[in-house]
Amino acid sequence: MPTAPTVPGARVTARGWGWRHAARHARAVSGLDLVLEPGERVLLLGASGAGKSTLLAGLAGVLGGDEEGDAEGELLVDGTEPARQRGRVGLVLQDPDSQVVLARVGDDVAFGCENLGVPRDETWRRVDAALAAVGLDLPRDHPTTQLSGGQKQRLALAGALALRPGLLLLDEPTANLDPEGVVEVRDAVARTAAATGTTLVVVEHRVSTWLPVVDRVVVLAAGGGVLADGPPGVVLDEQRDVLVDAGVWVPGAALALPARRVRLADDETPAVLLRAQGLAVGRRGTRGPAVAADVDAVVRAGRALVVTGDNGAGKSTLALTLAGLLAPAGGSLTADDALASGAGPAPVRWRSRQLLTRIGTVFQEPEHQFLAPTVRSELAVGPEALGLPAEEVAARVDGLLARLRLAHLAGANPFTLSGGEQRRLSVATVLATRPRVLVLDEPTFGQDARTWRELVALLGELLDEGSSIVAVSHDPDFVAALADDVLDLSAHATSVASRRGAPA
Amino acid sequence: MSAVLAPVHAPGVVGRVNPVAKLGAAIVLSVALLLSIDWVSAGVALALELVLLPFAGLSLRQLALRTLPLWIAAPSAVVATMLYGRDDGGLLAQFWFVTVTEGSMSLAGAIGLRILAVGIPGIVLFATTDPTDLADGLAQVLHLPARFVLGGLAGLRLVGLFIDDWRQLALARRARGVADAGGPWGALKRFGGQGFALLVLSVRRGSKLATAMEAKGFGSDTPRTWARPSTWAGRDTVLVLVAVVVAAASVTAAVLAGTWEFVLA
């Protein structure tokens, strides 16, 4: 395998460095003193809001100028400001879709080299070497739209490597990927870091993924500065409680879930709410091609059905169809009287308002479902659409604000919340109308361990209260904690396996 | 994005022509044909274009699929103009207040032919053009500012994401219980709200993309190199000249036939 030639690793020095985003009162980072030696491979941890992403953006020189915010102290790469030496630092971000610049794989990798003025022949040599280094065995003219999430992240990594950076920064590079994608990207990083000698900084909640790659762990304190710094084993051991509190997935730390719960015995048959028979689903409903077909599944009260399967197997489309949002492309989806209560057997024909108390949907991207300018009014949208009296609306909103730790954010704009807060809010907006069936698309994607625990505990409670859950998930821990039935949509494997007791 | 929008990799000469030459040829033809509304100039141009069509490098199926909108638009425009166009000359038919005259018939023919004569070369030339190659040409051949050309190209890539976003937003509104109240006025308000939500999402996506581009050195002061050379060759000049000849022939024919009617006069 051709590997990138050795580049001298960059030295990072922060002295009393801090940054305040324009229009914010609090500093995102303050009083940071830190030195990273060339070639060190560092895992950067800290609670949400401790400024990990801000530090990476500062090191990449993309925080912007004075109009974007103001800096204190100094932050240097090889003794110079990062923004003055483009190409010395490579950056890979969390969202696979927002990083692809061009339509063809080779062109996208070449983009950075072109910007740095690298001669044409040298550029293409670097492109081929970078694609090989990340294991993307594709022709240069392969369309970037046809890549999976893991491939897109490896493409972003190749684009960074082609710059021949002395410092490689990865900001939650695997948070939005399925388990195979996570391993693909992690292994590509491990190979290239070992081969090039670049200094590496990774931000990621899921520590166990990155422990084999890093040789130092730095924990940022929420109030500014460094909380802990040292070899991974030592830091994880000494700071275990702090890290668990901060939502870091510390290996070996028990997930401490409340024991679920009122499980139904084998001979009880919970009420059927939804029944799919030979169901085919398509992204555009009845128009356009089906992405999954011949699905048989039953959604029962008090049980959780988890849908798993490969990328592109049609999991999200199936969830949206079961949720009564997309028309089935074939076969049948019938709601039992227990759920329909007079609205008719086909959920897709129900009026929007009728869905509210019957089936609630939590979208994969919380931002798609936000409608109001504040968290409080966001929670009131559903109850108000139901025409509930004002006192009842207020009572439900206050209850959810408290239950999902959102009370201190009641006046904030939903778009300004962190990822974990947005996820909690998107679940809360659906709970506000108390639907009998809850459909969730990848609810634990990119969530820290604390949000994960809260979410799983909450869903467990809802199941115990008799609600029914349909969730699309790649997350093996989520499946283990909640699933009663698992529907695997992988090619040639469409089947329902009952994990526990009751008939599927 | 839909497969119909993706560029065709055409074999043969036209596939290798610089996109800037294709753009030039399409502009020459459109401008010449939009200067007059008469059936002779459009008819001559269309006839010459049909003779050149086999060299375009598209299969019959691709051609049919991509020009489909024209075959719907042209007849509808013909019928509409025939029935409702400016009346002139002898009366041919009449129902109620709808009249078909010699004048409206000839206008309808001129408009129908014109839609095809402008549309076919435009679609055929751009069907074989990759946006990246066009951007390369605009920057390297016409020397338009790289920042502007590449920014536009990157923005174009986001369009596919916006289509998906729009669908998700519509489904999410239905799920939130706000998709059926208020009649037509409510629907209009929801459409506006959804448009605003899309705007917010697109600004956020755009700023993330801008960060990724900046981290790769986009917008720095270093002079940029181009990984894909885009040069002007003899065949590019030939294509533009062919367009000029077609345009000149159609205008000359119309003037000689006495049907030329300059729209700006």
Image (cartoon, rainbow, N blue to C red):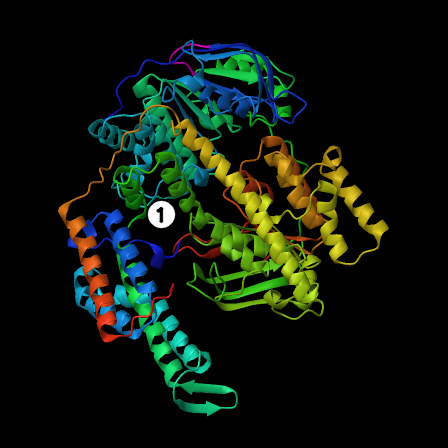
Whether residue A260 can be seen here: no
The residue drawn where x is 29% and y is 53% is B7
Label 1: chain letter: A
Q: Which residue is mark 1?
A: A146
* Of the pair B10 and A400, the residue shown nearer to us: B10
* A478 is within the stretch colored magenta: no
Residue at 26 percent across and 48 percent down: it is B19
Where does the image place residue B247, in percent across and percent down from the top left? Answer: 23, 62
* Residue A36 % position (x, y): 45, 11
- Left or right: where does residue A470 sit relative to residue B220? right
Left or right: residue A345 compared with residue A193:
right
Q: Residue A151, percent across and down?
A: 37, 39
Q: Position of residue B248 (x, y in %)?
A: 21, 62
Looking at the image, which residue is at 35% across and 35% down?
B145
Q: Quadrant of the C terminus of chain A?
A: bottom right
Q: Residue furthest right?
A: A391
Q: Quadrant of the N terminus of chain A?
A: top left
Residue at 29% in and 61% down:
B32
Instruction: State the count of labels.
Output: 1
Q: What segment is highlighted magenta in the picture?
A: A36-41
Q: Establish if A401 lies above or below A466.
A: above
- Residue type pointed to by label 1: Gln
How many C-alpha atoms fall within 10 Å of the one at disc 1: few (<14), some, or many (≥20)? few
Residue B105 shows in the view: yes
Rendered position, A2 above or below B62: above
